[in-house]
Image (cartoon, rainbow, N blue to C red):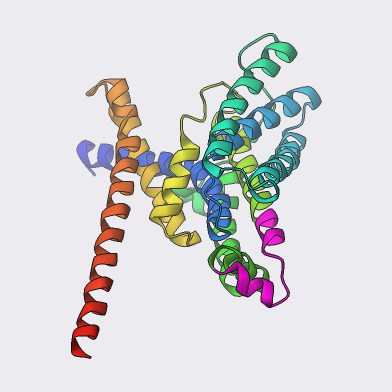
Amino acid sequence: MNENSWNFWTVASSTLNQMLRSATPVALAALGGLMTEHAGIMNIGMDGMILMGAFTAAAVSTALTSAALGIVASIVFGILVGLFFALFTVKLRSDEFIIGCALNTFALGITVYLSRTLFDSAGISNAPHLGNIAIPLIKDIPFLGSVISGHSLFVYLTWVLVAAMWLFVYRTPMGFWIRASGESPETLRTAGKDPEKMKWIASILCGVMCGLAGAHLSLGNLNGQFGQRMVAGRGFIAFACVIFGGANPVKVFLAALMFGFFDAIGLQLQSSKLVDADLTSAIPYVITIIMMVYVVVSGQRKRERIAKQQLKKLELK
């Protein structure tokens, strides 16, 4: 194998490895976001949920010198945030968009305040974090081992959660009830189930998944680091993935992988110093905008096609 070929496979494996790392927090948040989407709740507050989950994980991990307790704390806090979100959107029937924006703003302010108060700094560094897992046998396979092996627990957990979420949404009564609470709440109420209760459950599940996404960022991806700008819009990207994937867990995960791939490409270009760093960091966000434009245009064309079909049926009659 010549040097050029070796460099190609090295860069390719490094890019795919980074793709999985970058896609994981987006995929975790999107798995939570698709639950609220199915329940008929537009949740744009996931950015704030992820940020608070990241801070909670890093702060508790530092205070108790345990990454595991930091993760547990992020899950518990995610439940509380999910309950808070549901209180306003479900119980008090407040505007979802306004509550989501308020949650994002509140998260940015409270995490900075608590970080400065508790740690005398705008961020947290060197918190106990999760190590990377070397998978036996697979780690020794050329190329495949360098791509799949050597990630934090969250990367592998996400793969399991994608399958589990698909089974939950499409193969369990609870998943059906949650979907019905968003699609046909009156029918669900007639069947003896409370749509509001299903929306509460969906909101809590979203909070848990966003908490895990935040824990991955601070204790997995960044090795015990927390910064006030670390989420970098991943909550909004997760929301875009939910829309792009039609709230289907598998399709949503593939959309997150697409974001991760372009993020990895940007990092590779940045490290090669061929393109300005500010430009490369914008690549995944440009792709996200293209995704949303595609969804809007394809949705409009689908509606026009359905309208034409209905018009033809009326003309035949």
The residue that appears at 68% across and 46% down in the rendered structure is 92
Q: Position of residue 31 (x, y in %)?
A: 55, 53
Give the image quarter of residue 304.
bottom left
Residue beneath the point at 32% across and 41% down: 289
Instruction: Give x and y (percent) for residue 217.
Output: 56, 34
Q: Quadrant of residue 103?
A: top right
Q: If the image is split into quadrants, where does the C terminus sit?
A: bottom left
| Number of on-image labels | 0
Where residue 242 appears, as percent x and y from the top left, is 46, 52
The quadrant the N terminus occupies is top left
- Which of these two is toward me, 229 or 42? 42
Residue 44 placement, left or right of 49: left
Residue 190 is inside the magenta segment = yes
In the picture as drawn, the residue positioned furthest to the bottom comes out as 317
What's the residue at 58%, 54% (across, down)? Answer: 36
Q: In the image shown, does 177 or 69 lie closer to the viewer? A: 177
Q: What is the magenta range?
A: 184-201
Observer able to see residue 185: yes
**Relative to 200, does residue 211 appear above or below in the rendering?**
above
* Figure quadrant of residue 79: top right
For residue 26, side relative to residue 278 (left or right): right
15 and 2: which is toward the camera = 15
Please indicate whether residue 294 sits to the left or right of residue 223 in the image. left
**Horizontal and vertical percent for residue 316?**
19, 89
Q: Residue at x 28, y 52 (%)?
A: 294
